[in-house]
Amino acid sequence: MGFMTDVSWSPYAVGIGIGVLSWLSFLISKKPIACSTTFAKASGMLERLFRGQQVEQKAYYAKIKLKVDWQFMLVLGVILGSLIAALLSGDFGLQWVPPLWAATYGESALLRVAVALVGGVFLGFGARWADGCTSGHGISGTLQLAVSSWISAICFFVGGILTAAILFG
């Protein structure tokens, strides 16, 4: 169990683990691994706190059902698992500006948060527009040999490479 304290794991072992998790997800729940809808559900639940049950009458929220389900718990598990892994490896630390960002754009935490916020909005919009995220299309969809998911996964990689080239040269 010494690998539990490693800062990074073998990408091969992690890939195999995600593959096995995908199989188990299909076998047990009959559903693919995905997570982007959870963020839409969370925003709807948050809005419901302030506006009441009328929120559930919105067409999109009626379609996705504002409830805590297996996918919601998966996202919470990813967050909790990441925290546990960082604590076990001794790599946990609060950091507003990562070193690579600071070396390229400076130490401004406000700029870093603003860019992250804008990027998150674009990511969320794209995930909802594509009806899936990198885990939904890139893992589960490609596993099912869905052409749309393969196209999406290729676009994720091309977009990521181009964005990294633009941001970091």
Image: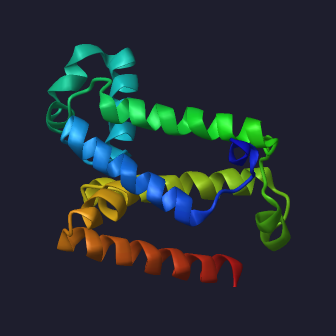
How far from the left and from the top, in percent, is residue 163? 56, 76
71 relative position to 1: left or right: left
User: Height in image: 37 above or below 110?
Assistant: above
User: Height in image: 30 above or below 158?
Assistant: above
How far from the left and from the top, in percent, is residue 169? 69, 85
**Nearest the camera: 59 or 14?**
14
Res. 50 image quadrant: top left
Query: Count of labels shown?
Result: 0
**Nearest the camera: 146 or 103?**
146
Quadrant the N terminus occupies: top right
112 relative position to 118: left or right: right
Q: Residue furthest front?
A: 1
Q: Residue drawn 31% across and 42% down?
A: 37
Q: Tell me, what colour scheme is on the image? A: rainbow
Q: Residue drawn 24% across and 24% down?
A: 55
User: Height in image: 84 above or below 133?
Assistant: above
How far from the left and from the top, in percent, is residue 80? 58, 32
**Nearest the camera: 82 or 62?**
82
Res. 47 image quadrant: top left
Q: Residue drawn 37% across and 45% down?
A: 35
User: Height in image: 63 above or below 35?
Assistant: above
